[in-house]
Every structure is written in C-alpha cells, then in structure tokens.
Image: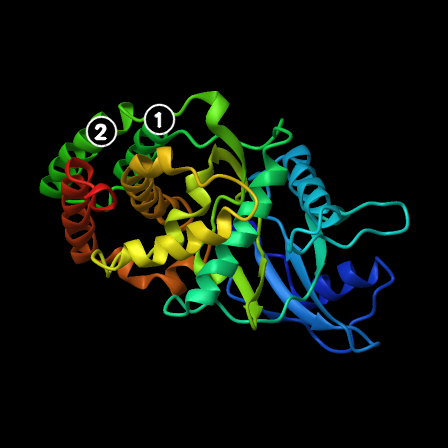
Amino acid sequence: MSHPFSSLSPDLVMSAVESLDIWPAGEPFALNSYENRVLMFRDDDGKNWIVKFYRPDRWSDAAIQEEHDFLQELTNQQVPVVAPWRDKAGVSLHYFKAYRFSLFPHCPGQAPELDNPSHLFAMGEVLGRLHEVSAKKAFQHRPTLEMASGVLDAQQRVLNSERLTLHQCRAYERVIEKTHQHLLKHNVPASSLIRCHGDCHLGNVLGRDEQFTLVDFDDCVKAPAIQDLWMLLPTDDPQGWRSYLSEITEGYEETGSFPTEQMSLIEPLRSYRLIRHSAWLVSRWDDPAFPRAFPWLADSGYWDQHIRQLEQQCLQLDNPRWLA
C-alpha cells in the first residue's frame, strides 16, 4: 500500500513552489515533521521559507483555511505568530497535483529556557495576548477537544493494531477504563472553550532575548485556555512547578485573568495526550517515516512501559500535583 506522501519527490516539491512564482535557489531540505511534510528552502533573493504539504484526508480545506485566517487575525492584532504567505489574490492554501500546501516565512529562534524567569514571563504574556484575541470569535470548522470520547477512540485504535499481547490488552483496557471514568468528571462547558494553539509545547515557541513567537498551529482546536499552558510546565520538577507557574501567570495577566479555575484539568489533559499519542503512532504506521522515527513502538516492552505510565498517571488523577 502506498502511503500519502509516496509521490512527494524533491522535484515535485520544487515544482509546487515554482508554481507560485517563487524560485528556490537550491533543493529544499526536510524538517522534523511526521503528520505533514515540512521543508525549508531559500529563494533566489536569499529569503528563507517553510513549505508545508498537508497530509491528505486529515483536515478539510475549510479547517485548514480557518487555521490560516486565525493566524492572520492574530498577526493583525500584533500577536507574535507566523501567518502563511498569500498570493496577490489573497490565497494561502495552494494545490499542486495530489497535494495541498502552504508557504510560511521562516521563523528563526530557540525554545525558551524554563530556568529563566524572564522567558517564562514572556511566554505567559504571549499566551495571554493570544487568548485575548482568540476568545472574541469561535471556530466553525476546527475540532473540539473532547477528552472522554477521545480516549475511547484511541483505545480502539491501539487494540485494533494487534500490537499488544492478550495480557497487555487486559491491563490496557483496565487502565483506560479507569482513566475514562476520571475524564467523564471533567466535561468542560462550551462557554469555557476558546480557540487554542492546541499543541503548545516548548518546541513550538521560538525566539531570542525574551521575544517569543508561537509557531505550528496545525492542531489548533476549541479547548479550555489551560490547554495552551500546561505543556509548558515541567513534569520532572513537581516541587518547583509553582515558581514556573507564578512567572507564566504574571506575564499572562498583563492582558487578562489567568484561568486558575481550570487547573484541575491539567492531569486529565496530560492523560488524554499520553493515550492519544500512542494511538496516533499506531494509526500512522503505514507511513514509512513513522517506523524510522519510532522503531521502539514495535517492541512489546514499549507497551509494558506505556501501561505502567498510564497507571502512574491515574494516581495523579486521584491526587493532582498541581492542586497539592
């Protein structure tokens, strides 16, 4: 079976870019991206670009366009994000043969340093500005983050992959059921959902000298605001998280109130992400990029470790570290 990007050759990438009257000075090189294919190139004027080819059948055109329009709205409101390039007709989503693609100006920079209070403050300030704008409208075509139903869908994908032994299947089903019961207690009212980045980990925050930009809104979603904040808090320092959170909160509250009432969602959101991540990997295994990047998924030991991690996470659902 051919995978979705089997025909995406370097020549096709070059031809797609050139179809927009932008001329690469050399062959684009691939960046670390698995869901889509993302490459960087320099044009003949010396400007660096990012070209993203979207995975077929993942998002509708309307959902991709809504992401692009959200980014443009944020840019217009001086929120530091990277909006896609648009041609003279204002088009940002382009087509070439079997593929949809877009261009973004390259955003240089490094991830923030968690041990630098000014970096934490700056991240909080950027996210506060993001949420101030994002709360003014609602997505119409992007998904809503639904934890309880999402973990059941993930469970089915993992079990259908037939990667788990019978013993592992039973242990996995038990821990998913326990997690699901916890998540049912954390239904978020629609009034608390806003347009969120959705995947706001440190790798998607780039900058220098306390000036940071949010990148890669491919997973933007309707969600509680805390979804864009919890991944910035370290899990390996449960005693020191309050100092990290204090700086982020101070920056966030430059523009609005920090969503303290959503702190109880942090461990449920973490559980949801852990479960969905493994399900995502097995569902993409026919794409050759995944076995190369995640070879350990094929080992039985990975699933033992994953189940133990979920069991430990259930203890956090019982006694959240963030509320201690």
Residue visible at 63% across and 57% down in the picture: 7
Task: Select label 1 or label 2 by which is in front.
Answer: 2
Residue that lies at the very extreme toward the right in this rendered image: 88
Kindly check if marks 1 and 2 are in contact, taking CB atoms under 8 A apart as contact: no
Disc 2 secondary structure class: helix
Left or right: residue 47 compared with residue 186: right
Badge 1: residue crowd in 10 Å (few <14, some 14–19, many ≥20): some
Left or right: residue 251 compared with residue 263: right
Q: Is 304 placed above or below 207 here?
A: above
Q: Is 245 placed above or below 276 here?
A: below
Q: Amino acid at mark 2?
A: His
Residue visible at 47% across and 59% down in the picture: 121
Label 2: which residue? 182
Does the image show residue 1?
no
Seen from the viewer's position, the closer of residues 239 and 138 is: 239
Disc 1 secondary structure class: helix
Q: Report the Cα–Cα distance between label 1 and label 2.
A: 12 Å
Seen from the viewer's position, the closer of residues 245 and 232 is: 245
Q: Amino acid at mark 1?
A: Ser
Q: Is 12 placed above or below 60 here?
A: below
Residue 166 on image: x %, y %: 12, 39
Badge 2: residue crowd in 10 Å (few <14, some 14–19, many ≥20): some
Residue 13 on image: x %, y %: 70, 63
Residue visible at 89% across and 45% down in the picture: 89
Seen from the viewer's position, the closer of residues 14 and 135 is: 135
**Quadrant (top left/top right/bottom left/bottom right) for the C terminus:** top left
Q: Is 187 placed above or below 16 here?
A: above
Residue 31 on image: x %, y %: 55, 67
Q: Which is more N-terminal, label 2 or label 1?
A: 1
Seen from the viewer's position, the closer of residues 320 and 159 is: 320
Label 1: which residue? 149
